[in-house]
Image: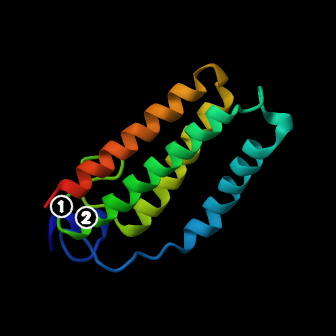
């Protein structure tokens, strides 16, 4: 058995092409995500309202983060490996499906609660995600 299979219980090396079972995701992650969304959307929880520029920055952040998630999936399917220490070298579909929404919500949450740095966090996070997506798609 290969090292990846022994340590992580994965299928074919370098990556299992079939999605892992993610039943526990909806059981444990859904209430957490729902709570964060409600907290973000609740106007009473806002330190101050979002400006139009900040909303545009949030849209750019989500687009960049989503592009990074999609291209990471494609890159791994082409046989490349991930360099993110949190995800590991060969993450499963489920791990990717959990990691990107959670880190996206964390980024939006930090921006929400730190209004002085809100635009900077969102524009730089979106730029980072877009840059990583361009890098991922450039790998042959």
Residue 134 picture location, percent across and down:
28, 50
Q: Tell me the quarter of the image containing the N terminus.
A: bottom left
Image-based side of 51 in relation to 64, left or right? right
Residue 89 picture location, percent across and down:
24, 55
Image-based side of 98 in relation to 26, left or right? left
Residue 131 picture location, percent across and down:
32, 43
Q: Residues within 10 Å of mark 2 (few under 14, many from 20)?
A: many
**Is 97 above or below relative to 12?**
above
Of helix, strand and loop, which one carries label 2? helix
Can residue 133 be seen from the camera position used here?
yes
Mark 1 and mark 2 in contact? Answer it, CB < 8 Å. Answer: yes
> At x 13% / y 61%, what residue is drawn?
140
> At x 37% / y 46%, what residue is drawn?
130
Image-based side of 30 in relation to 5, left or right? right
**Is 23 above or below relative to 60?**
below
Q: Which residue is mark 2?
A: 76
| Quarter of the view holding residue 57 | top right
Q: Which numbered disc covers residue 80?
A: 1
Number of marks present in the image shown: 2
């Amino acid at each position: 058995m290969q090292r990846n299979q022994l340590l992580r219980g994965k299928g074919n090396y370098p990556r299992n092409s079939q999605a892992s079972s993610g039943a526990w995701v909806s059981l444990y992650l859904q209430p957490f995500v729902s709570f964060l969304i409600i907290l973000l959307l609740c106007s009473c929880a806002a330190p101050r309202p979002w400006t139009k520029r900040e909303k545009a920055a949030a849209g750019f952040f989500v687009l960049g983060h989503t592009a990074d998630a999609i291209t990471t999936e494609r890159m791994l399917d082409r046989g490349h490996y991930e360099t993110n220490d949190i995800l590991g070298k060969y993450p499963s579909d489920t791990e990717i499906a959990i990691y990107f929404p959670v880190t996206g919500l964390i980024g939006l949450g930090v921006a929400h609660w730190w209004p002085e740095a809100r635009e900077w966090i969102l524009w730089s996070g979106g730029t980072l995600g877009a840059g990583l997506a361009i890098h991922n798609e450039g790998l042959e």
